[in-house]
Amino acid sequence: MKKFLVVIFIFGFHFVNAQCAMCRAVVESGNASEAEGLNSGILYLMVFPYILVGALFYFIIKNRKKNKI
């Protein structure tokens, strides 16, 4: 199970430097500091759903193991 989670974690963060096509087109016309700021903002907003889903799965797995014993 731990190996599976590590693989998901590695492949999940393989795409952290990505942006949507529309945001990228708008940013390419501006300067580099605006582009970095927008990309950081997108990553910041993207992290929280993954944390919440990860915590949910953690508690589900923890409760399943607790109920089996």
Image (cartoon, rainbow, N blue to C red):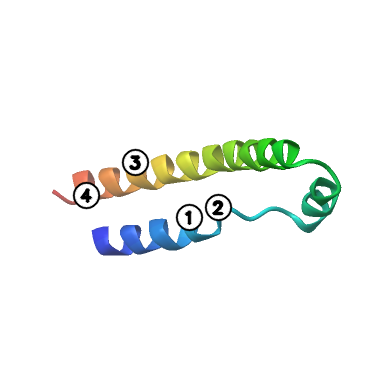
- Residue 41 in sight: yes
Q: Earlier in the sequence, mark 4 or mark 3?
A: 3
- Please tell me which residue is depicted at 70% across the width and 36% down the height of the picture: 33
Is there a contact, CB below 8 Å, between mark 2 and mark 1? yes
Q: Please say if 44 is above or below 9.
A: above
Marks 4/2: CA distance? 32 Å
Residue type at numbered disc 2: Val
Q: Position of residue 37 (x, y in %)?
A: 68, 35
Answer with the quarter of the image where residue 11 lies: bottom left
Marks 2/1: CA distance? 5 Å
Answer with the quarter of the image where residue 58 lies: top left
Give the structural element (helix, strand or loop) at label 3.
helix
The numbered mark at residue 40 is none
In the image, 28: left or right of 68? right
Q: Earlier in the sequence, mark 3 or mark 1?
A: 1
Residue receiving disc 2: 16
Marks 4/3: CA distance? 10 Å
In the image, 61: left or right of 9? left
Looking at the rendered image, the disc whose residue lies closer to the viewer, 4 or 1, is 1
Closer to the camera in the image, 45 or 22: 22
Residue receiving disc 3: 59
Q: Position of residue 60 (x, y in %)?
A: 35, 46
Q: Earlier in the sequence, mark 4 or mark 2?
A: 2
